[in-house]
């Protein structure tokens, strides 16, 4: 690759040394080019100069579940009593 680059440099001594984005930037920054050409170069280079915004799906983590089978009978009764108090004395389904 280096050999090919050296051959190109010898064949075209005034070739632009940067990449495509740098070339487009040099065009749109040069006031000697027409406004239309500069605008076109700026539009093409812009997508490489700044990241584009994208919609990102946000997933909610699953809600924690309480395994009532691990509670003792007394703990279950306490929990049911607390739920009745919080829910306004409405019956809690079994």
Image (tube, rainbow, N blue to C red):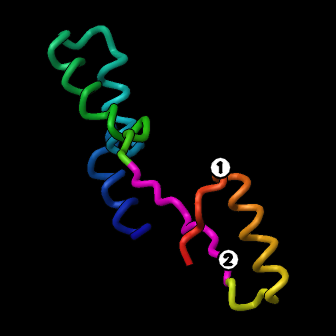
Q: Position of residue 47 (x, y in %)?
A: 33, 38
Q: Residues within 10 Å of mark 2 (few under 14, many from 20)?
A: few
Q: How many marks?
A: 2
Q: Which residue is mark 2?
A: 66
Quadrant for the C terminus, please: bottom right
Query: Range of the magenta residues?
Result: 56-67
* Closer-to-camera residue (72/81): 81
Describe the element under mark 2 as helix, strand or loop: loop
> In the image, which is nearer the foreground, mark 2 or mark 1?
1
- Is 83 within the magenta? no
* Closer-to-camera residue (33/6): 33
Name which residue lies at 47% across and 60% down.
59
Residue situated furthest left in the rendering: 36
Q: Which residue is mark 1?
A: 88
- Magenta segment main secondary structure: loop
- Is 60 within the magenta? yes
């Amino acid at each position: 690759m280096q050999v090919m680059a050296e051959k190109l440099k010898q064949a075209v001594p005034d070739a632009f040394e940067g990449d495509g984005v740098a070339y487009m930037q040099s065009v749109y920054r040069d006031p000697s080019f027409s406004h239309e050409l500069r605008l076109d170069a700026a539009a093409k280079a812009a997508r490489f100069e700044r990241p584009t915004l994208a919609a990102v799906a946000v997933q909610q983590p699953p809600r924690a579940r309480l395994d009532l089978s691990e509670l003792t009978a007394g703990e279950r009764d306490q929990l049911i009593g607390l739920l009745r108090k919080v829910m306004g004395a409405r019956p809690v389904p079994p």
